Image: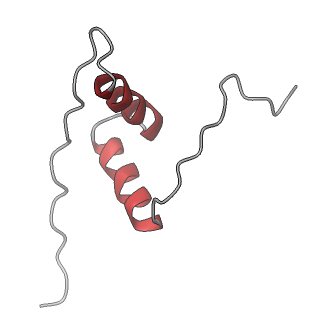
Amino acid sequence: MANKHREKLRGVRGVDDQLWTDFGDAVTRADSDRSAELRRFMEWYVRRVGADHPRRPAAPEPQDGPA
């Protein structure tokens, strides 16, 4: 099927739009994606053998704004 995903779609509730956007920006800075980082966290959280705690990316550079 053309629109059939290989993996089951898992939903995350209770995440506001700004948090989702900020998380997307952060994983992009870490050269990753949301799914990979959420999976990495869950594997660490349930103590899967060989799983390491995900590292946070560097903070974004402050942007110049109105003074």
Q: Is residue 53 left or right of residue 20?
A: left
Residue at position x 36%, y 52% in the image: 23
Quarter that holds the N terminus: top right
Q: Which residue in the rendered view is the most extreme toward the bottom? A: 67
Q: Is residue 10 left or right of residue 18?
A: right
Where's residue 19, x and y in %? 38, 61
Where's residue 52, x and y in %? 23, 20
Q: Which residue in the rendered view is the most extreme toward the right? A: 1
Q: Nearer the viewer, residue 13 or 30?
A: 13
Where residue 40 sits, quadrant-wise, is top left
Q: Does residue 40 sit above or below 60 in this rendering?
A: above
Quarter that holds the C terminus: bottom left
Where residue 66 sits, quadrant-wise, is bottom left
Q: Is residue 23 left or right of residue 66?
A: right
Residue at position x 65%, y 25% in the image: 7
Q: How many marks?
A: 0
Q: Nearer the viewer, residue 67 or 5?
A: 5
The chosen color scheme is secondary structure
Q: Does residue 66 sit above or below 12 in this rendering?
A: below
Q: Which residue in the rendered view is the most extreme toward the front? A: 46
Q: Nearer the viewer, residue 12 or 32?
A: 12
Residue at position x 81%, y 34% in the image: 3
Residue at position x 79%, y 29% in the image: 4
Where's residue 13, x and y in %? 53, 55
Q: Nearer the viewer, residue 30 or 16?
A: 16
Where residue 8 sits, quadrant-wise, is top right
Q: Which residue in the rendered view is the most extreme toward the left? A: 67
